[in-house]
Every structure is written in C-alpha cells, then in structure tokens.
Image: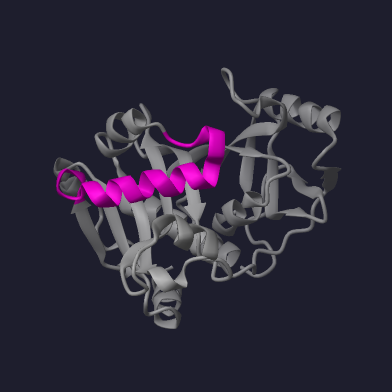
Amino acid sequence: MQALAARFFARHPALSLAALGAADNARELDLRPAGIPVEFLPAEQHGALARQYLELNQLAFGKLGLPNWVLSDLYLQPGAIGLLRCPARMLNETSRQLLRLPDEEQVIAAAYYAAPTLTPGQFIGVSLLSFLPGIHAGAWVKALTLKMLGARRMRGIAQWNNLSLRVHTRLGPLRLVGHVPGVHDYVERSFLYEMDLVDEARQVAAMERRFLLQPTLRLSASDSPALGALLRRAEAGEVLYLIPPGLEGGEIHVHEGPLPSRAGGL
C-alpha cells in the first residue's frame, strides 16, 4: 500500500493529508499511514475548518447532514476526521460556490470519519464525502484514515443502489452482516457490512481493480425481496460477500462462500 499511496500523491502533488480532532487524540493516531505524512489540526484551534467540514457534510447529505453538536460530541471529541485537502480551484463547482474561497486557499476535497467501537481495532464507518471527482479521492481518504486510526476491521451501512459501493469495494470485498439495526432513514434499501483490513495485498489489488472474482450471484439493486432474502441468509451465518466493483449496470455482485485464498489479480 505504501508504494501505491506514494504514486497517488506523486500524480496529485496539490493534495495533502490532514486530520481534524480534539488535541489529545493526536497521540493515539498513526500520523504516517502508508508512509504519507498527516498534518494533525486540533479542532480547538481550527474552528473555521470544522465549520467548513460541517457545511460540506450538509451539502453532501442534505437532510441527513450533520448537526453541529454531533460534530463536536461524537466526531471531534472521541476521534478524528481524515481529510484530503487541495486548492479551492480544484473542487467541483457546487462546493466552490458554497465555500466562496480564493482559488489557492486550502480546502477540504474529501473526508472520512469512522467511529471507535467497544471491540478493539474495530471501527464503524460513518461519513464519506468527496468533492474532487475522477481521481478516487473518496477511496483514498477512507483507506488512509482507517490506517491512521489503526483499524483492523470496520463495519458500515450502505445502500444497495448507491454508487458509493464502487468506492467502498476499492478497499476489498464487503462481507454481508445483515439488516441495519435500529431505525435508519433509508432502512428499506440499506445493509450492514464488515471488512477485514488486515490483508494489505487484497486491499492494493482492490484499489487497483486487480481483485478479479466472478460473482456467483447477481441481483438487481432494486429487487428488495431478493436483497432482503440475501441478508437473512447472512444473518443465519452464511458467508456472503459483495465483491468489486460492487454495483455495475444496476446489479449487485455477490460471491457466495469464503473467498479463495488467491483471487485473480493477486
């Protein structure tokens, strides 16, 4: 992963990696994930950056955008938000109009937050956003943030019909866990997944789209009964993976059973 990350930043020298969180959290982070230096920005001293993140989060997620108190209490206090930053001129037009900053001002291009859990080494993916299209910024900020946090496993909630699945599967296959617990705004089309983050060779292959595994099952992303049945199989203990690229042509790609020790491209 280190060589791949170095090539990414060499291709995009205007990008830099940063983290925003409570000052005391810095000592718990790996500030050179995959060899990439992280500028840690204490939230207590960077209120303008926290507000910028809040505005971009609300732009990205609309009615599900982050309330102010959640950012303070549940993001910045217990953890850190991973940030890719770039000059404002590189952002897409919508976010540039929102921020109205000079072209060379450093701004948030992509961001990822994962929350700590009671299980050591396991994090819950909470929020991924990117305003820099065409270079896989979302996948990179997610991958490097999880390394910065020292995550060995993560769980997340995603939607079957959301193109973000193509981003999530750049870190590898998603093992299906089941239905989303509690009350979620998009519960009808959401699912819970987990990822093993220990196999770095698999991550690199997935990031480069060299993880080649033929699906044993394809389902329409809009076929709610079939997708619900799939999740019930996972909840009953069956091993099921959503495999790269995750979503293609409106279909979900599934591998039934354990992953082979070596998929094509590894």
Q: Residue at x 14, y 41 (%)?
A: 24
Quadrant of image for the C terminus: bottom right
Residue 156, x across and y down, in percent: 53, 37
Pick the front one: 3 or 11 = 11
Spot occupied by residue 253 in the image (x, y as percentages of width and height) = 77, 50
Name which residue lies at 66% across and 26% down. Answer: 187
Kindly report the secondary structure that dominates the magenta region of the rendered protein: helix
Instruction: Please state the horizontal and vertical placement of residue 177, each as a whole percent of the image.
Output: 62, 31
Residue range in magenta is 42-66
Instruction: Give above or below for 93 relative to 216.
Output: below
Residue 89, quarter of picture: bottom left
Q: Is residue 143 magenta?
A: no
- Check the picture and name the quadrant holding the N terminus: bottom left
Q: Quadrant of residue 15?
A: bottom left
Whether residue 200 can be seen here: no
Q: Is residue 104 left or right of residue 23?
A: right
**Residue 94 to residue 13: above or below:** above
Q: Nearer the viewer, residue 57 or 188?
A: 57
Of all residues, the one furthest to the top in this rendering is 182
Residue at horizontal 55 percent and vertical 33 percent from the top = 63
